[in-house]
Image: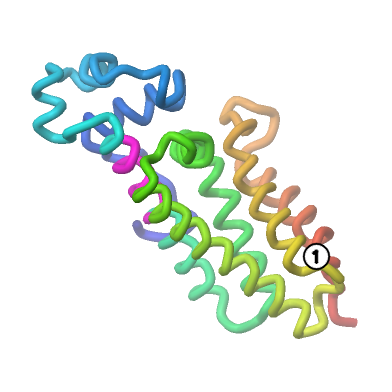
């Protein structure tokens, strides 16, 4: 990754790329191993050589997505420095860009958590909680600094996460607005949500 705003086509292994496509189109339970193998150009035994089960494919897709999301969030915060508004803006922008540029991965992760086996579900929820803590801290720091006036920082942080994740369900590249315009619009909404008050 050259920069947290930069998105290139992902070079996923063929089985993961095929699984991601199938899960996004048909859902985990609506997808067969045979379908994934066919999309990947492999036999079923050939697919099992790389991934021993459909569950392992779901976990592989989800782990790659969360690693990408978390690394971009951390890079955005590191670049933003110490100013709480800059940190908030960078984090929300990073989340919005991820959920538009990696919408299939984001959609599968959020919609198929119910399909993950219990052990991995705990791991995935741990990743998700780590991301939520970044948002919690960004909102709380803005309130402490007196630049955010929301009386409900925890609720605001959860609402922000929901807003950013939800982008993956409706954004389409062929829509009327490009990524930059949607970032601008949704960042304005995010600032309104936390009661951003510019210093006079």
- Looking at this view, name the residue that lies furthest to the right: 200
Q: Secondary structure at mark 1?
A: helix
Q: Residue at x 75, y 57 (%)?
A: 190
- Residue placed most toward the observer, 125 or 24: 125
Q: Is residue 174 above or below residue 152?
A: above
Q: Is residue 62 magenta?
A: yes
Q: Give the residue at mark 1.
A: 194
Which quadrant would residue 176 be assigned to in this image?
A: top right
- Is 16 left or right of 196, judged from the image as shown? left
| Colour treatment of the image | rainbow
Q: Residue at x 57, y 68 (%)?
A: 133
Q: Which residues are magenta?
A: 58-67
Crowding at dot 1, Cα within 10 Å, few <14 / some 14-19 / many 20+, comes out as: many
Q: Is residue 20 magenta?
A: no
Q: Is residue 176 above or below residue 64?
A: above
The x, y position of residue 129, in whole percent, is: 52, 61
Which quadrant would residue 1 be assigned to in this image?
A: bottom left
- Residue placed most toward the observer, 78 or 33: 33
The x, y position of residue 123, in whole percent, is: 39, 55
- The quarter of the image holding the C terminus is bottom right
Q: How many marks?
A: 1
The x, y position of residue 73, in whole percent, is: 50, 63
Q: Residue at x 57, y 30 (%)?
A: 173
Q: Is residue 185 above or below residue 75?
A: above
The x, y position of residue 195, in whole percent, is: 85, 67
- Is 190 left or right of 70, judged from the image as shown? right
- Residue placed most toward the observer, 67 or 34: 34
């Amino acid at each position: 990754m050259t920069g947290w705003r930069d998105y290139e086509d992902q070079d996923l292994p063929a089985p993961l790329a095929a699984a991601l496509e199938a899960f996004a189109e048909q859902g985990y339970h609506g997808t067969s191993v045979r379908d994934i193998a066919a999309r990947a150009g492999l036999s079923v035994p050939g697919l099992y050589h790389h991934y021993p089960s459909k569950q392992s494919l779901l976990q592989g897709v989800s782990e790659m997505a969360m690693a990408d999301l978390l690394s971009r969030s951390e890079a955005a915060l590191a670049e933003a420095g110490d100013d709480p508004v800059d940190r908030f803006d960078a984090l929300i922008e990073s989340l919005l860009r991820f959920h538009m540029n990696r919408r299939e991965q984001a959609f599968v992760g959020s919609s198929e958590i119910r399909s993950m086996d219990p052990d991995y579900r705990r791991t995935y929820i741990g990743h998700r909680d780590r991301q939520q803590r970044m948002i919690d801290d960004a909102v709380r720091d803005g309130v402490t600094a007196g630049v955010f006036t929301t009386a409900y920082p925890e609720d605001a942080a959860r609402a922000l996460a929901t807003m950013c994740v939800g982008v993956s369900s409706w954004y389409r590249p062929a829509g009327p607005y490009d990524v930059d315009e949607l970032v601008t619009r949704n960042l304005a909404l995010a600032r309104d949500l936390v009661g951003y008050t510019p210093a006079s």
